[in-house]
Image (cartoon, rainbow, N blue to C red):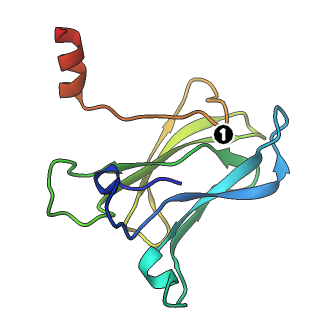
Amino acid sequence: GVINRAYVGKKNKFVYGSISEESMHPDDSIPKCAGLVKPDLDVSSNGDEPTLACRMYGPNCYGGEPFFVAREPENPNVEEDDGYVVSFVHDEKTGESKLLVMDAKSPQLDIVAALKLPRRVPYGFHGLFVKESDLQKLNEN
């Protein structure tokens, strides 16, 4: 699972985690990721229902590691879940792969964009978002 990177080392309320199936990837021994879940860590300690949001990818569709992208990463006054959850998803029946962009605040992690990819991204691929200004700093050195 992942959290909003602005909350690393701080008390956080939300985590975005993978929902695994019992069947395994054909190429290794890790479970297939069939969807995402967003539990509320504060509520779960009270015994209430911890799940705030859930998105299943659909039949024969499996995804990679989710990643949280803040809507306004430089604004310290926004809510912790104000942003997007992104994940690569592959349809094993059609062979089509997409990058899904989901609204992190919505109860079903609503898809706000689905970008068709020219080829499959391997299961287990890790991603990282870097600001353009940080890339420019690297180019200056």
Q: Quadrant of the C terminus?
A: top left
Describe residue 62's horizontal placement relative to residue 79 as left or right: right
Query: Residue 72 appears at what percent x and percent y?
Result: 20, 51
> Disc 1 designates what residue?
90
Residue at left offset 14%, top offset 63%: 77
Query: Residue 20 appears at what percent x and percent y?
Result: 72, 57
Seen from the viewer's position, the closer of residues 11 and 122 is 11
Q: Quadrant of residue 92?
A: top right
Seen from the viewer's position, the closer of residues 76 and 105 is 76
Describe residue 124's horizontal placement relative to residue 92 as left or right: left
- The vertical placement of 82 against 132, above or below, is below
| Amino acid type at image mark 1 | His
Residue at left offset 42%, top offset 67%: 14
Q: Badge 1 local density, few (<14 within 10 Å), some, or many (20+)?
A: many
Query: Residue 18 appears at what percent x and percent y?
Result: 61, 56
Query: Residue 88 appears at what percent x and percent y?
Result: 56, 40
Residue at left offset 82%, top offset 31%: 27
Residue at left offset 66%, top offset 30%: 122
Q: Quadrant of residue 36?
A: bottom right
Task: Residue at the far front: name it.
Answer: 9
* Badge 1 element: strand
